[in-house]
Image (cartoon, rainbow, N blue to C red):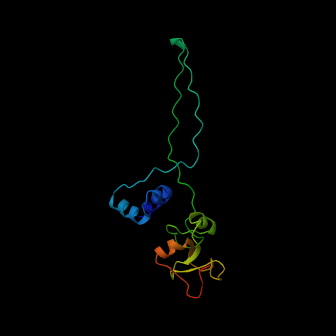
Amino acid sequence: MKACEDEWRANRAANQSAGITEKSYVEKCRAGGTQQAAPAAPAAPAAPAQAAPTRPTTATTAAPAAPAAPHTAPSPPATSTTAAAGPALGVGQFKDEAPAKARCPTDTVVWVNTDSKIYHFAGHSDYGHTKQGAYMCERDATADGARAAKNEKHP
């Protein structure tokens, strides 16, 4: 299961753009199906192409072909999916506020207490300060079953 989750996270952007949720991906992966939206993007840009060596015009001095570079699988991009000492974050959950704002520029970013499923708005004392939690778009938080704190007003 861990390998399936890691594989999904390595291809998170492609999977999300294809509408594949982590849960459905892991279920198919564990069942033996292969549901890849797109191959993982290489972590580093490829080396610039070199000009092909020219062959001499005489047959007696032909240059040997250059050996092919060994193929190595690209490492998955480094992503921060876990809090310093907390559990793994789910889809649409962020450790920092900036990526959450980038995901939902027209929606309100809230801090969701993942234990109680209650979210807090910016400016409240619990915003970003509960033991277990993540920054999320408000629409994602409500879709996950979270609700706003009763003692807070929507900004």
Number of numbered tags placed on the structure image: 0
Q: Which residue sits at x=52%, y=78%? A: 114
Compared to residue 121, the image places residue 72 above or below, namely above
Does 134 sit above or below residue 103? below
Q: On the image, which quarter does residue 137 sit in? A: bottom right
Q: x%, y% of residue 151? A: 59, 88
In what quadrant of the picture does the N terminus appear? Answer: bottom left
Q: Position of residue 7 (x, y in %)?
A: 45, 57
Image position of 86 with respect to 38: above or below: below
Q: Nearer the viewer, residue 85 or 106?
A: 106
Observer-nearest of 54 and 91: 91
| Side (left or right) of 120 relative to 59 | right
Residue 50 placement: quadrant:
top right
Foreground of the two, 33 or 65: 33
Q: To which quarter of the image does residue 152 belong?
A: bottom right
Q: Residue at x 63, y 66 (%)?
A: 98
Q: Quadrant of the C terminus?
A: bottom right
Residue nearest the viewer, comparing 124 with 9: 124
> Residue 28: horizontal and vertical position, in percent?
35, 61
Left or right placement of residue 7 versus residue 77 in this view: left
Name the residue rendered at 50%, 57% in the picture: 13
Q: Position of residue 55 (x, y in %)?
A: 54, 18
